[in-house]
């Protein structure tokens, strides 16, 4: 097992703990390009790492009564179809196509994070940058009936989780705020429960349909380091300005996305 597993897990855990949504998106590139895993195995391993880390990170939120279990389980159940479909699609596309699409996803997330940070900087100084979701949905998207909003959003988040092996928190948190009218702290806590459900569903589909061999010692070490990093990252937010953290992470995402695209795209042509 590579000696880089622990440092990588700590860094990704720090990002998850300090930034919330979007942090887990670095897991797949780290597994592929640093630890040498095949893309499909990496996305499957990422589901396990993200799911377990989210489940453990859920506990302090639950103790603080920031998790709505019933609604979170309902949202996760509605996303089951998307998770299964995403897992099926991921098993049928070429690995380099999967990585190219992943690079595009990272660029989208980085753009949304930078947009949020600059919008908050231009606003009143008293505004808290952590109180706004990474993704802000246009009010017109909320004109559809409430149930339809919930079903469509849950399916979309499940699809992202199943296909890319990411938690989808950058979409999930604002979705819970807008579709279910959750307060922001409750949306963050409940999103961890939904991510755990979606990850478990997608992981089950991956293992039963694809049967990918997983490096269990690597996954265990990576997950343990990520859990520790997430706990430290949660404390880091009170010491560093959230805007600085968000912009630094977005720049890192752009760099990783460009590197991933440079490695994956030439093999497609």
Image (cartoon, rainbow, N blue to C red):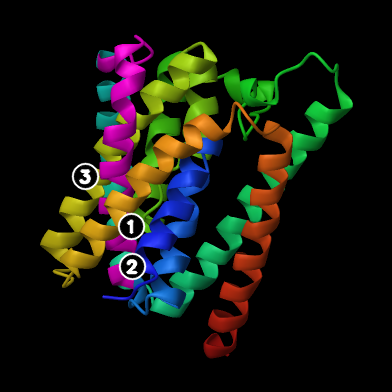
Residue designated by label 3: 201
User: Which of the image's four quarters has the C terminus?
Assistant: bottom right
Front position in the image: 54 or 234: 234
User: Which of the image's four quarters has the N terminus?
Assistant: bottom left
Residue 219 is inside the magenta segment:
no
Span of residues in magenta: 40-69
Residue designated by label 1: 46
Q: Give the image location of residue 93, x and y in percent.
A: 37, 73
Q: Is residue 113 above or below residue 125?
A: below
Relative to 143, 158 lies left or right: left
Q: Is residue 107 above or below residue 118?
A: below
Circle 2 SS class: helix
Q: Bin the neighbour count of mark 2 within 10 Å (Cα to Cα): few under 14, some 14-19, many 20 and up.
A: many
Are the two marked residues, 1 and 2, in contact with CB atoms closer than 8 angstroms? yes
Question: Which SS type dominates the magenta stretch?
Answer: helix
Front position in the image: 60 or 136: 60
Relative to 123, 128 lies left or right: left
Q: Give the image location of residue 135, x and y in percent.
A: 62, 34
């Amino acid at each position: 097992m590579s000696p880089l597993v622990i440092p990588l897990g700590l860094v990704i855990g720090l990002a998850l703990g300090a930034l919330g949504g979007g942090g887990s998106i670095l897991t797949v590139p780290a597994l592929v390009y640093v630890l040498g895993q095949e893309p499909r195995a990496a996305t499957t391993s990422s589901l396990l790492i993200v799911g377990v880390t989210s489940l453990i990170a859920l506990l302090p939120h639950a103790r603080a009564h920031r998790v709505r279990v019933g609604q979170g389980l309902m949202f996760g159940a509605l996303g089951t179809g998307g998770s299964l479909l995403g897992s099926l699609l991921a098993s049928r596309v070429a690995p380099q196509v999967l990585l190219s699409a992943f690079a595009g996803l990272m660029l989208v997330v980085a753009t949304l994070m930078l947009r949020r940070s600059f919008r908050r900087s231009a606003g009143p100084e008293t505004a808290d940058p952590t109180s706004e979701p990474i993704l802000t949905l246009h009010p017109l998207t909320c004109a559809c009936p409430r149930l339809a909003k919930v079903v469509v959003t849950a399916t979309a988040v499940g699809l992202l989780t199943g296909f890319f092996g990411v938690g989808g928190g950058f979409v999930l948190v604002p979705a819970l705020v807008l579709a279910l009218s959750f307060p922001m702290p409750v949306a963050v806590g409940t999103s961890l429960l939904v991510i755990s459900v979606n990850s478990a569903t997608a992981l089950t589909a991956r293992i039963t349909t694809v049967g990918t061999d997983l490096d269990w010692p690597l996954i265990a070490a990576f997950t343990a380091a990520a859990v520790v990093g997430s706990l430290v990252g949660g404390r880091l937010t009170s010491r560093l300005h959230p805007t600085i953290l968000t912009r630094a992470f977005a720049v890192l995402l752009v760099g990783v996305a460009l590197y991933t695209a440079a490695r994956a795209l030439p093999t497609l042509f």
